[in-house]
Image (cartoon, rainbow, N blue to C red):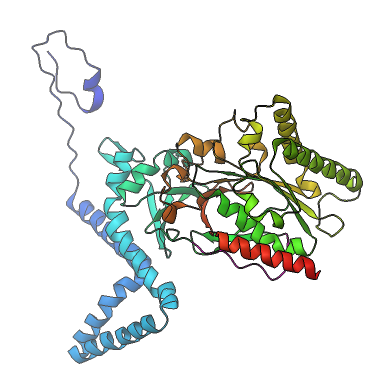
Amino acid sequence: MFKKLPGDQVSGLVSTTPDTAVVFRPAVVQTPAILTFLIFLGRLITGTVRLIWRHPVALAVPTVPVLLGWLYGWQAALITVTVPLSIVIAWALHDRDSFNHWIGRRLLAWWRLIWVYRRHWQSVMIVSGLGRHLRGRDYLPRLMRVRCTSWADEVTVKMIAGQSATDWSDRIEHLAHGFGARSCRVSIARAGRLLLTFPRQDPLAVPLPAVPIPEEAAVGPVEIGTREDGTPYRLKVHGTHVLIAGATGAGKGSFLWSTVRGLLPAVWAGLVEVWALDPKLMELSYGRELFTRYAADPAECADLLDEAVSVMQKRAGRFAGVQRSHTATVEDPFVLVLVDEVAFLTAYQSDKQLRHRISAALATLTTQGRAVGVGVMAALQDPRKEVMNIRNLFPDKIALRLDESEQVDMVLGDGARDRGALADHISPVPEIGAGVAYVRLEASPDPVRVRAAYVSDADIRAMVAAYAGWGEAA
C-alpha cells in the first residue's frame, strides 16, 4: 500500500493495515571522488595548521632532533637533545619556582589537556547534559585552554550558544568526577566563556601558625591567613560588616582572634577600639584585657550595643554634610563590635525584651554603622533565618564547615554552592578542616576558599602580656 519514502516523512504516516510494513530507504547522493579528496585535503591542512599553532613547542621538541639527525647524522641529533636537557635539569634543580613558572606547569598543562580533558571531553559533556547529540551530530562546548597553577587546573570553556553559567554550576559534581577532581568551581571569564577550576591538591590541608603581629598600625584589610592560591588572605573589617557561620569546632575563633591580632597595633595607637560581646564566656574571655569594652551578661551586652548605637548616631550627626566616609583618627577611632555566638542573644535569649533590644541594636548598626566607622563582626553556628533574621545586612560573609548543603546558600547567598562553595564538604578533622572557609565579598559573587591561622592559647597570653606592657609604657 505504501511506497518507499525518503527522509522524515515516514514518521508522519499512519498505517491502516498493521500487517503492511513501512519501508524507509534514504536517498543516496553520488559525490564525485575529486570533491571528496579536496574536502579531505582541506581538513588535513586545516588540522595541521591548527596543531602547529596551538602546540608549536611540543611539536618542535621531537621534530628538530629528527630533522637534524636526518641532515647531519645521529651525533648532531644527540647533541641537540642532551645539551638542552642538561640545561633544563640544572635549572629545575637550582631554581624550581622559576622552572615551574616557565616550563614545568606549561608541560603539565599540555599533558593534562591531552590526557585528561580532551580525552574525556565528549563523553563528559554528553553524559552530563552540557552537550547535545542531534541527528548523528554532536554539539559540544569548546575546550579553549588549560592552565595549571601550583594547586589546580584552570580550564577555559566556550559555551554553546544559548547556554548560561547556571547550566554549568548545576553540574559541578558531574564535571568534577568526570575529570577525576575532588571538586569544580565555575566562574565567568567573559561573555560566553567560563573558567572551570579543578583542584589537584589541597594547599590548605595543613594548619597555619598565627600570623605575626603587624609592625605598623592600620585599620585596612587585616592579614589573617592564606588563600587557596598561596597568597596572604586579608580580611576587610573597616567599612563593612562580617558574618561568620560554622558548626561547632569549625574554627570561628581563628577568624575572630586573627582579626584582633592584626588590629593590635592600631588599638595601641588609638585608631581602633574593639568591643567584645561574649555570652558563652568561653572564647573571648580568654583575652578580655585586649578589648576596649567587654560584656558577657545578656543585659550588659544589650547596654553595650545600645552604647555603640549612640556613638554611631552622634558621629552621624557630626559627619552630616561634612564627610561621607570614615577615616580612623584618635578622636574618632574605628569601633569593631565582636559578637561571639550571636544566636545566644538574638534567638535563644529567654528575656523577650532583651532579645528585641539586641536585635534592634544589631540591625541599626549593620544598616548605618559602616559609613561612620562602626563595624560588626558576628559569629554563629545556626544560619537559619529564624535564628539570625538580619544575616542579609552583612555585606561580607564567611562560611566555615556547615552541617547541611542548604546552609551554604543561607550564609553566602543563592547559588554560592553551585559556584563551588562546598562548605558542607570541609573535613570535620580539626587538623585538616578547622579554620578552612569560603568567603563571599560584597564586590564579588564568586566564593574564595581560605584558611585562617590558628591563634593558640599561648599566642593569646603573649598578646595580652605585650598589650599590657605597651599600655603601661604609654
Whether 223 is among the magenta residues is no
Q: Nearer the viewer, residue 286 or 356?
A: 286
Q: In which quarter of the image is residue 304?
A: top right
At which x and y percent is residue 194? Answer: 47, 49
Residue 46 appearing in the image: no
Q: Which residue is drawn at 76% across and 57% down?
A: 272
Predominant SS of the magenta segment: loop
Q: In this view, does 371 lie to the left or right of 135?
A: right
Q: In which quarter of the image is residue 2?
A: top left
Q: Which residue is drawn at 17% across and 42% down?
A: 30
Q: Residues in magenta?
A: 208-219
Q: Which of 362 and 171 is in front in this view?
A: 362
Q: Which residue is drawn at 89% across and 48% down?
A: 319
Q: Which of 13 and 34 is in front in this view?
A: 13
Q: Is residue 403 left or right of residue 466?
A: left
Q: Is residue 112 left or right of residue 235?
A: left
At which x and y percent is residue 430? Answer: 44, 52
**Quarter of the picture holding the N terminus:** top left
